[in-house]
Image (cartoon, grey):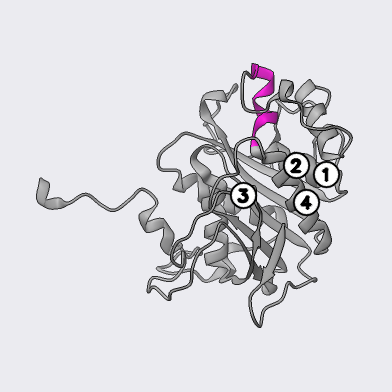
Amino acid sequence: MEFVVEEGKHLNEECSTLILPALSIGNVGQLAVDLLISSMRAERIGYLDDPNVLPCVGNDAYSPTPQGHLVLPLEAYGSSSNTLTLVQQRSPVVKGMMVEFAKNVADFAAASGKKHIVVLSSLDFGRWQTIDMSSGLQIYYLSSASMDGTDDDCERLGWKRLQEYNPEQRLWKYLSTLAEGNAELDDNMAFEDELGEEDYYPSLPFAALFSCFKAKGLKVTCLLCYCSEGDNIPEAFHLADAACSLLGLNPNNFQGNEGSKWIVPFSWQTVYGPPPDRSLF
């Protein structure tokens, strides 16, 4: 993976925390990262070139007036005021290459001096075992702070550790071995085909990222929420709020628009395509 810095910009070494999405059902993590970049008025400092990510190109995702700034598959943004670096991923990873991609991102994070990685991801609502909506949307987490994935800071915030995480389960263990470079990818242990129920969670992108960051000795916290395909904007707000709570940031200081603490990114206006032609009705 090559990091290309934009002219006149630099990667602030004082920004020791990195936030990035793991693309999954509903892509809530991607939406949440866009919301954080927009609300923090983070500045694009460069992009990452990785052969394992499918190519894409588009117009500026944050400006309501097209500036001609091309959007690329993997971009890095800096928020010096919040001592954060944010990486936005806009296209999926080539099938079968998720572990290699995760290794490359982990190498970049370690080389650039990052100490804490926050991965934002959604999970399939159909897999939710214990549904309790009495307190609204819930956040689950997975942390490298302890062997069993628990973290005292996350517990104090009222979040629950992902119950399905079991470091001794065959695919979690195999994923950890791959991340540490002690094995090669075995076609007989495919991550995307013929998986059992217990293999579902370690087959997801966030699991590969978690394992590879952990193998690099970096602290990593995955913040997770369940969703279905469709309008997941409420979940994106919830996940972005959770990231701020974890990092001790106050979204009220973002000075959003229209009386809100958040600045809704311009890209959200076309998340679900253009509105229907009203002349049809």
Decide whether the magenta segment is chiefly helix, strand or loop. helix
Of all residues shown, which one is farthest toward the bottom?
Answer: 8
Residue at which label 1 appears: 214
Amino acid type of the residue tagged 1 in the rendering: Lys
Label 2–label 1 contact, CB within 8 A? yes
Counting residues from the N terminus, which is met first, the one under dot 3 or under dot 4?
3
Amino acid type of the residue tagged 2 in the rendering: Phe
Mark 4 to mark 1: distance in Å? 9 Å
Amino acid type of the residue tagged 4 in the rendering: Ala
Mark 2 to mark 4: distance in Å? 9 Å
- Residue 21 numbered tag: 3
SS at mark 3? strand
Counting residues from the N terminus, which is met first, the one under dot 4 or under dot 1?
4
Residue at which label 2 appears: 210
Mark 3 to mark 4: distance in Å? 13 Å
The image quadrant that residue 232 belongs to is top left
